[in-house]
Amino acid sequence: MIVLYPQSTYATEAISQRETIRVGFFEMDGYHMQDETGKRSGYGYDTLRLMARYWNVRFEYIGYDKSWGNMQKMLEGNEIDIGTSTHKTPDLKKN
């Protein structure tokens, strides 16, 4: 006998209540990539997908047409919540 259970209301609520995190997602070969159809790939993207499984969040990817410098400004302006693939500046190398 096979018994089918409808999806619980609790599970539906949990999915809809997941926090959305705005990620700065800029073009970087091998790390952040997006084809002409919008399909994303790359090491950074795959890592975020794995994190989302355990963190129970939804990522919104923003700024693919922008540069790393734009991402820093977007982060300071609260347009995105996290930036990935940081670069060491000469000032940071001193520390």
Image (spheres, rainbow, N blue to C red):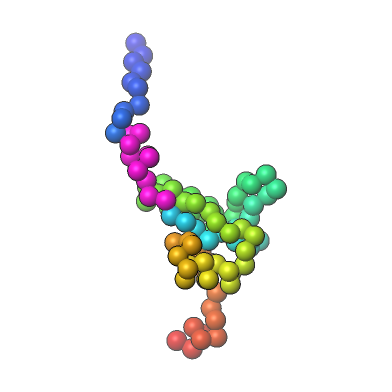
Q: Residue at x 47, y 51 (%)?
A: 59
Q: Is residue 24 left or right of residue 17?
A: right
Above/below status of 14 relative to 89: above
* Residue drawn at point x = 41 percent, y = 46 percent: 53
Q: Is residue 82 visible?
A: no
Question: Would you say 43 lies left or right of 58 here?
Answer: right
Residue 67 appears in the picture as rendered:
yes
Q: Nearer the viewer, residue 47 or 20?
A: 20
Q: Which contiguous range is marked in magenta?
A: 11-20
Q: Quadrant of the N terminus?
A: top left
Question: Residue 80, how many percent across, how many down?
Answer: 48, 61
Residue 51 position, x and y percent, is 43, 53
Q: Is residue 41 left or right of residue 36?
A: left
Q: Residue at x 64, y 52 (%)?
A: 34
Q: Nearer the viewer, residue 52 or 23?
A: 23
Residue 29 within the segment the image draws in magenta: no
- Which one is in front, 79 or 90? 79
